[in-house]
Amino acid sequence: RKEVEQDPGPFNVPEGATVAFNCTYSNSASQSFFWYRQDCRKEPKLLMSVYSSGNEDGRFTAQLNRASQYISLLIRDSKLSDSATYLCVVNGMDSSYKLIFGSGTRLLVRP
Amino acid sequence: EPEVTQTPSHQVTQMGQEVILRCVPISNHLYFYWYRQILGQKVEFLVSFYNNEISEKSEIFDDQFSVERPDGSNFTLKIRSTKLEDSAMYFCASSAGTVAPGELFFGEGSRLTVL
């Protein structure tokens, strides 16, 4: 089983749509969870951390289900500028500071 | 806004040559990292560095790789004898260490092409 698994997409949605991405991770000992965003040929940038209670940042909502080892990201009212690859990231088994990246889910928002 | 800077942005080298990639992390950060991303693949951890020593490294980070913080600002990745499969984007990152692990700030990357 992959350490962090994501649907590669692409998700092709119209502006204003709501879209959800899912991610599963294999290491039950992972303590830190994140969504990063990566634009084509650019560096990853932190979008948001994911907390056990779930958290929201504007149009973005992240959820964590530790029992199922599952993380989600919901984007409401999609904008053209949301087009990017969304990376699910968890910390590694043997260290809090080693991050394991998923392969990413590509989102295309069309006019 | 503070940022991580990397040089060069692109380097082309012949197989077997030594390459040094340079990074200037954010000045008050304590943890430094190198990650790499082969074209079309996921971002992979190479090494983390704290208190002037490697805190951990991945299986990719073999004897051909080394890191150094030669002064108070630079953080370098050296590849002693490059292979074709070393062609990738290399990202330097830093974190303050006082916030939740994973809130890394990445540089724009150094693209390495090995011919």
Image (cartoon, rainbow, N blue to C red):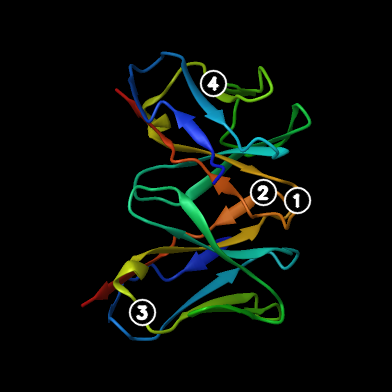
Q: Is residue B49 above or below residue B19?
A: below
User: Between residues B109 and A4, which one lies in front from this camera angle?
Assistant: B109
Question: For the residues tagged 3 and 1, is the chain the same?
Answer: yes
Q: Are marks 1 and 4 in contact (CB under 8 Å)?
A: no
Going by the numbered disc 3, the residue's amino acid type is Ser
Q: Are marks 3 and 1 in contact (CB under 8 Å)?
A: no
Q: Residues within 10 Å of mark 4 (few under 14, many from 20)?
A: some
The residue at 57%/47% (across/down) is B105
Going by the numbered disc 2, the residue's amino acid type is Lys
Q: CA distance from mark 3 to mark 4?
A: 42 Å
Label 2: which residue?
A98
For label 2, the SS is loop
Q: CA distance from mark 1 to mark 4?
A: 25 Å
Label 3: which residue?
A78
The residue at 32%/85% (across/down) is A16
Q: Are marks 1 and 2 in contact (CB under 8 Å)?
A: yes
Q: Residues within 10 Å of mark 3 (few under 14, many from 20)?
A: many
Label 1: which residue?
A94
